[in-house]
Image: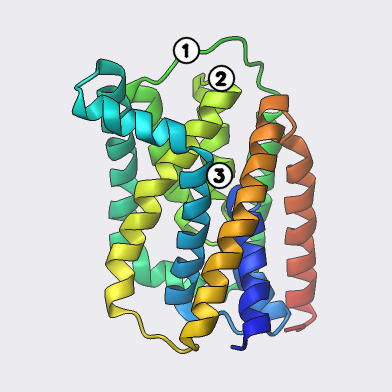
């Protein structure tokens, strides 16, 4: 993998990590259909860490307020912290038990296309939810969002799309659904990094890893700001048509043997 290819994958990751269209699915499609080497799971995690920086920057005030509130033992912060932890446990267990299976699916274009179609369906129905109030965080609602996040370990299923839509389904306001979704991404991504990076087998130059990290962080911040705006305006349905289109293209190209 050269610097240009690393940058291409980083841009794809930065755009699709937060836009509800599945970053893992797009990375796999870009690698297999555009003949750009993916760089393996380790490089994928580095790109995710880059987009995680975007979350820290965008939600810096919320994150620092949460940490301060936990140290001061404020009830609201303690509840949110506990809910984030409990919502992370299901995806951690699923990732540990199904890691090899998930890795094998990263090259299955038909599966990824089907998962993208599933993501599009969730987004389509989320547009029909009438959000009338702000119930706030509750342990039960947060746990349900965390359970839904386990689906996103499958390549082609959008983590942000699944968790935001589930948040809307269980009664979060649009702004709260987006915030909780991205705060929930922090322990999930950091946990994956801690698990995989120490034993990772690097097959690309270190300079390209840095390029991928920085590009994914910068592009990710812009994509995050854009998605939050769309969520507040209730405009996720358009992404459903995009996911369906990409899924159809993936099926057609795979059936025709394009790679």
Residue drawn 43% across the image and 31% down it: 62
Q: Is residue 29 left or right of residue 138?
A: right
Q: CA distance from mark 1 to mark 3?
A: 20 Å
Query: Which residue is tagged 3?
Result: 160
Instruction: Answer whether residue 20 is visible to the viewer in this image.
Output: no
Q: CA distance from mark 3 to mark 2?
A: 15 Å
Instruction: Answer whether residue 15 is visible to the viewer in this image.
Output: yes
Q: CA distance from mark 1 to mark 2?
A: 7 Å
- CB of mark 1 within 8 Å of CB of mark 3? no
Residue drawn 79% across the image and 65% down it: 249
Residue 84: % across, % down: 33, 36
Looking at the image, residue 157 lies above or below residue 103: above
Q: Quadrant of residue 259?
A: bottom right
- CB of mark 1 within 8 Å of CB of mark 2? yes
Residue 29: % across, % down: 66, 71
Circle nearer the N terminus (1, 2): 1
* Numbered label attached to residue 173: 2
* Numbered label attached to residue 135: 1
């Amino acid at each position: 993998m050269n610097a240009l290819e690393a940058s291409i994958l980083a841009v794809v990751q930065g755009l699709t990590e937060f836009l509800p269209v599945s970053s893992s699915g797009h990375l796999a499609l870009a690698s297999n259909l555009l003949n750009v080497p993916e760089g393996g799971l380790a490089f994928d995690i580095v790109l995710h860490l880059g987009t995680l920086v975007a979350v820290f920057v965008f939600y810096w005030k919320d994150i620092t307020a949460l940490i301060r509130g936990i140290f001061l033992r404020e009830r609201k912060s303690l509840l949110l912290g506990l809910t984030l932890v409990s919502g992370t446990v299901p995806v951690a267990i699923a990732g540990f038990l199904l890691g090899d299976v998930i890795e094998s699916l990263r090259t299955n274009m038909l599966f990824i296309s089907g998962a993208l179609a599933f993501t599009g369906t969730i987004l389509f129905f989320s547009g029909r939810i009438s959000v009338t109030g702000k119930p706030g965080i509750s342990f039960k609602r947060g746990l349900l969002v965390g359970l839904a996040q386990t689906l996103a370990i499958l390549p082609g299923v959008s983590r942000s799309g699944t968790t935001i839509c589930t948040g809307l389904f269980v009664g979060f306001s649009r702004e709260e659904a987006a915030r909780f979704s991205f705060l929930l991404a922090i322990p999930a991504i950091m946990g994956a990094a801690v698990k995989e990076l120490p034993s990772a087998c690097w097959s690309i130059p270190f300079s390209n890893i840095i390029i991928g990290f920085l590009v994914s962080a910068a592009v990710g911040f812009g994509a995050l700001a854009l998605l939050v705006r769309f969520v507040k305006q209730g405009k996720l349905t358009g992404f459903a048509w995009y996911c369906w289109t990409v899924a159809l293209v993936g099926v057609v190209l795979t059936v025709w043997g394009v790679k």
